[in-house]
Amino acid sequence: MITHKLNSKTELEVVREEALELNLLQKFNAFADRQKPYQMIWWLLSLMVIGGLALPLTFLLVYSLNGPVIPFLTLSMISFFTCLVSNMGGMGIRVNLGTFWFSLILHALMASFTLLA
């Protein structure tokens, strides 16, 4: 073990750069890592919320309000099956939660676009 002696009259300040820069991705990854024991619950929740609520509600809003049915239905089905495949394919919890929240945001944007147009 090597010991260094500092001969200085100023205070030594040690700052970890990782602690200073907590961006949104790092916060999401920390949250996702804490949710690892609940991965099965998140899988069931994503199937129920996206497949049973977001997908049919978006399709009904788009179809009944004369929105762009084919593009929105295509995006909706692709996001649903992406979430389904990532969950059933054994991906990590970070990917599963990411696809779940992305799908929810996408469905909310499609529904709001249809309501506002």
Image (cartoon, rainbow, N blue to C red):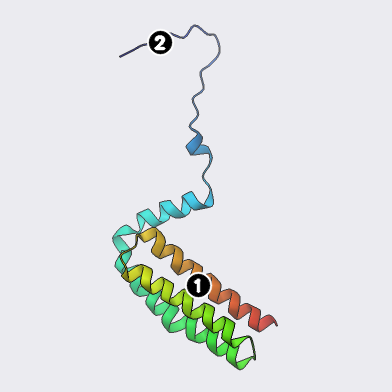
Q: Residue at x 53, y 38 (%)?
A: 20
Callout 2 amino acid: His
Q: Circle 2 sits on which residue? A: 4
Q: Circle 1 sits on which residue? A: 104
Q: Residue at x 42, y 8 (%)?
A: 5
Q: Is residue 89 left or right of residue 94?
A: left
Splitting the image into 4 quarters, where does residue 42 fall? bottom left
- Residue 84 lies, with reference to residue 70, above or below; the image says above
The local crowd at label 2, few if under 14, some if 14 to 19, many if 20 or more residues have their Cα within 10 Å, is: few
- Residue 116 lies, with reference to residue 29, above or below; the image says below
Residues marked 2 and 1 touching at CB (< 8 Å): no
Image position, residue 2 (x, y; %):
34, 12
Q: Quadrant of the C terminus?
A: bottom right
Residue nearest the observer in this picture, 97 or 34 = 97
Splitting the image into 4 quarters, where does residue 35 fall? bottom left
Image position, residue 98 (x, y; %):
45, 63
Q: Residue at x 51, y 79 (%)?
A: 76
Q: Earlier in the sequence, mark 2 or mark 1?
A: 2
Instruction: Measure how far apart labels 2 and 1 are at the Cα level.
Output: 55 Å
Mark 2 element type: loop
The local crowd at label 1, few if under 14, some if 14 to 19, many if 20 or more residues have their Cα within 10 Å, is: many
Image position, residue 66 (x, y; %):
65, 91
